[in-house]
Amino acid sequence: MKKPVQYLFYMLALGVITTSCAKQPATRTTADTLPVTAPAPTQDTSGSARTAAPAASVAGRGEADSKKPATAKFVPPSESAIPKNEFGESVLLGKKIFMNTQQYAKRYVGNGLNCANCHLDNGRKTDSAPIWAAYVLYPAYRAKTGQIDTIQSRIQGCFMYSMNGTAPAFDSKEMTALVTYHYWLASGAPTRVKMTGQGFLQLPKPAKSPDLARGEDVFKNNCVICHGANGEGTKAASGEYAFPPLWGKDSFNWGAGMHRIDTAAGFIKVNMPYGRFGTLSDQEAWDVALFMNSHERPGDPRFKDSLEATRDKNHDENCLYGRTPGQLAALLEKKAAKKAEADKAKARESDDKASKERTTPLWDGYSPATAH
Amino acid sequence: MRAVSIYVWAVAMTIGASTTVAGPATGDVAAAACTSCHGKDGAGNAEAGFPALAQLPHKYFIKQIADFKSGARTRTRDLHVGDSEASEGYGYYVSFMKSVAKALSAEDAEAAARYFEGLERPTLVPVAADPAVIARGKQLAVNGDWDREIPPCFKCHAVDGRGVAPSFPPISGQHAAYTERQLQAWKTGSRTNDPQKLMKATAEKLTDDEIRSVAAYLATLGTQSQGGGK
């Protein structure tokens, strides 16, 4: 039984080699002039040609290139493909924890949120820090902390700040299941490649500085029906939040990535108002992000000595932690100028590289994290 | 079907008349004027196309009555008995409620809302439907289809579709024909009273097939008995 199958395989392989050889002379002349956006097929030892580079954008450290077209879209495996074995059981438990953290990892959670409230479609949705794109970028070095971030430490961070709770140990049942779920979602993804849709969308700086009064209007007209007049969320009859709280004791704390105005603006632009995705203007997204993040929420667990000291140590970021909206506006202005400069430099650099570079460069090993 | 419709039309007119005569009636009288179509148990009537009202959130209920009255629930023109065409059209069904709502005082509407809100959502009677259709509907309700930016129905209508008061009505345990009609009405622009166009935004992305599937699935979650209208 085995012999004929092997024979068949050889013949097929030969077929591939001969046909690709036969075609080569015809295509060779044009191959050299192919544009970089369509990488030339790279020959691989098995004799078959790898057709397209994985869904990756050529991007610098921590920069989401929203303008660059994706070469191909990465599709995480469907639920029905979870193996029916012990590994699959761990994947499933991880998914349950991710969807319903309140129930399945209760002892580590200090607010009313679930992982999937911010990482939509159970960690699959692009531009909502999808888990499949995160998994392949770690371990990565973070200059600010002088440490290597791992996927586990990133998950711990979301527990401590986004979930206002405590970090599950690396070898805890919950961490193991979550990492297994992350790993499984990234099935077939290339490692150390920044894929299109990784992280949250980076919205360009708005024309006008974000404004609290305008933000309040946006909030009243677009968010109250689900998140409540005081951002307190809305519970279903079961007692669980159907619509999660945006501020107050049951929301993310002052150390969470979502407390940054830029991160929140990008999240809101893509995902809110829920069901009418992408209908807010960039300006409205920034305004309402500022309004949302100007309210009370659980404190930054890193607090030490004073608000100013904690801010200076941990919040060199775009937020209202110990800062007025005016001071924030000035910081945004500065950041935008710096980014324009960097973009120019990058454009020059990629012009230089364009003629040489065919394959997707590997991730530079710096953590894409901007918070916690 | 046609005969049934004419019969209920007649009932509606009498009820309209009697509520007006009764004046500021008690809640019982108000509810009685409704139960002939929506059932004492609030289960509605699948055959005639009357929706289940049990468990509708108070605010949602009052808003619908106001919207029937003002015409805000629908963009289509009212159709009347004797109109030959489109007896199944959306305006046809809405026109029942329009006359009922017009005859209803604010107090009666309050009383009726309280009455129906307090009823249990009717219990499950299996409906015959193709399992593949049901499965497709379930997929949409639970997971949505994010490639087409269709969010799961249950994110807005709560896990299991039981609704989130005050603005998101329950959608499970509803007659498939009614659910289908509402989704089509949003898709085609006939139902226009959803806040912030939240329902239209989703309905207009659904294919006719998906509408049928999700309506069939939702009807399996606590389907009501047939005889509710009597």
Image (spheres, rainbow, N blue to C red):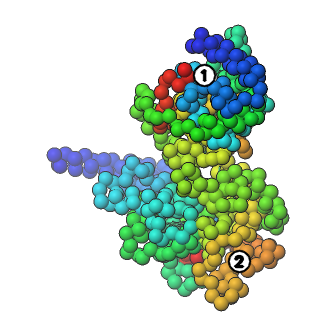
Name the spot of residue A83 as percent of width and height, x first.
Answer: 33, 54
Query: Tag count in the figure?
Result: 2
Nearer to me, A345 or B140:
B140
Q: Residues within 10 Å of mark 2 (few under 14, many from 20)?
A: many
Secondary structure beneath label 1: helix
Identify the residue at horizontal 47%, vertical 66% (top origin): A106
Position above or below: B213 against A235? above
Q: Is residue A229 above or below residue B173?
A: below
| Residue B7 marker | none
Residue type at mark 2: give it: Tyr
Residue lying at the far bottom of the rendered structure: A305
Residue A293 in view here: yes
Image quarter hosting the C terminus of chain A: bottom right
Counting from the top left corner in percent of width and height, residue A11 is at 27, 47
- Residue identified by numbered label 2: A321
**SS of the residue under disc 2:** loop
Q: Position of residue B27 (x, y in %)?
A: 67, 33
Above or below residue A347? Residue B61 is above
Residue at the disc numbered 1 = B36
